[in-house]
Amino acid sequence: MTTVVREHLPFSAAELIRAWVTGWAPAREVPPPVEVAGGFRLHVGLPGHRVRYVLFDVERVAELARTRTAPGTWIKVLAPAEQLRPLLTPAWTVGEPEYPMTGPLRRATASVPSGYTLEVEPAGAVVLVRLRAADGTVAAHGRIAVTGETAVADRIGTDAAHRRRGLGSVVMTALGDAAAARGAHTGVLVASPDGYALYTTLGWTRHGVLTPAWIPEPAPDSVPAQPRPAR
């Protein structure tokens, strides 16, 4: 089995994916992941994103691509796009690469810039963090789901009007502090191409590439009307 390196213990590819999906589910308020051969299945239940398979074994892709053909089905696999594409049928669309990352979680006090207010709100296993501007609007936000020794950071973002002020770093510090206070010591996340640079500067380590693919679901107004049943 492929092994990647984490900050504290050996971390196999399967363990990395397990840690991520186990925290991603409560962070997104969806049912817990179900283990399948080569990875996990998540019921997301959103338009265009009904079900998601997250795989650490790329050899499982070809079978899933042939047999899971409902629109709104997603596959994310720990492999580059050039390895994924030949295994898919023409029905699938391949997206931009994403980057699984891990980082140390520590108790630390976030340094909040003048004019902003930090809010930390526990919500069960998840901690929500918001930075509010002087007018009360949310300037930056994020959440972290603690699942034991690991915690999954998710939905981290900064409003366009407040970027380049270090607010993302403030949010990440507050999330790390909250998770460490609950006993977690290793953070896990999947970074977008835009977010990757921020996490790298904060000392997070990349572990390969996670490539998404999906079968598009028609927009509601493009779905043909269904014939009315005979009465």
Image: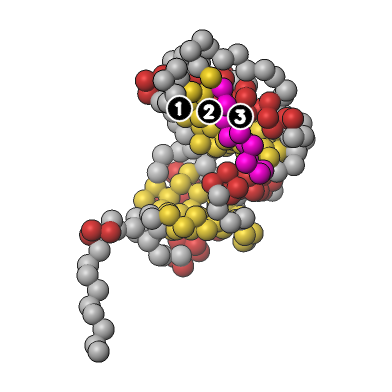
Mark yes or no: residue 20 visible: no
Q: Earlier in the sequence, mark 1 or mark 3?
A: 3
Q: Where does the magenta region start and end?
A: 118-129
Q: Amino acid at mark 2?
A: Arg
Measure how far apart labels 2 and 1 are at the Cα level: 6 Å
Mark 2 and mark 1 residues within 8 Å of each other at the beta carbon: yes
Q: Amino acid at mark 3?
A: Val
Mark 1 and mark 3 residues within 8 Å of each other at the beta carbon: no
Q: Residue at x 69, y 32 (%)?
A: 179
Q: Please, what secondary structure does the residue beneath circle 2 have? A: strand
Q: Quadrant of the C terminus?
A: bottom left
Q: Amino acid at mark 1?
A: Val
- Front in this rendered view, residue 56 or 50: 50
Q: Residue at x 42, y 26 (%)?
A: 137
Mark yes or no: residue 212 visible: yes
The location of residue 199, given as percent across then percent down, is 56, 25
